[in-house]
Image (cartoon, rainbow, N blue to C red):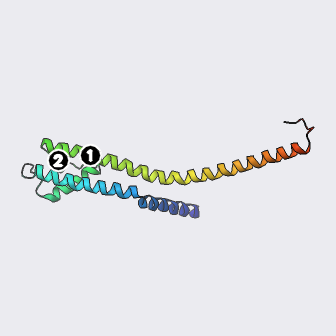
Amino acid sequence: MKRHLRRSWNFFWRQLAKAFRNPIFLALTIVGNTALVVCACLLYFVEYGVNPQISGFGDCLWWAFVTITTVGYGDVTPITLFGRIIAVLLMMTGGVLFFSFLGLLSSSFVEREFHQLEHEIRDLRASVDRLVNERDASRRKDPDDSRV
């Protein structure tokens, strides 16, 4: 049991590392971080001085982290129309990024299973071809055999 659990954890961490090395992961990370910083800056320019909950850029950065991760504590909320539009865009970006990361990780796990199935199918095809060839060879030896 202990050995099985250890192998499972090792497999999990290998697949996770494989997903992190994928260039798509890097692109998604760059897009996510850029969206986070840009939205924090936009919120600062739109809400600073108008919204009493925002006393500096740190509050906007905190709000962006909380919003993009869909945690939404509610301690900092935009009050202007443009601030709310920025919030909606950041929420949608967070959702898209989350599901993209999840899909990337899932595909790395499924890929291994897919390769194992391909290998099994290849072996089965080779066995079927071998059996068909043996049957054809035995028919050539005994042409009067009426078996199908």
Residue type indicated by callout 1: Met
Q: Is residue 65 visible?
A: no
The local crowd at label 2, few if under 14, some if 14 to 19, many if 20 or more residues have their Cα within 10 Å, is many
Please name the residue shown 80% across and 47% down the image: 133
| Residue of label 2 | 77
The secondary element bearing badge 1 is classed as helix
Residue 91, numbered label? 1
Q: Is residue 129 visible?
A: yes
Please name the residue shown 33% across and 46% down the image: 96
Please name the residue shown 17% across and 59% down the image: 58
Q: Give the alpha-carbon distance from disc 1 to disc 2, as whole Å.
A: 13 Å
* Residue 45 percent across, percent down from the top left: 11, 52
- In which image quadrant can residue 19 be found? bottom left
Residue type indicated by callout 2: Thr
* Residue 125 percent across, percent down from the top left: 70, 47
The local crowd at label 1, few if under 14, some if 14 to 19, many if 20 or more residues have their Cα within 10 Å, is some
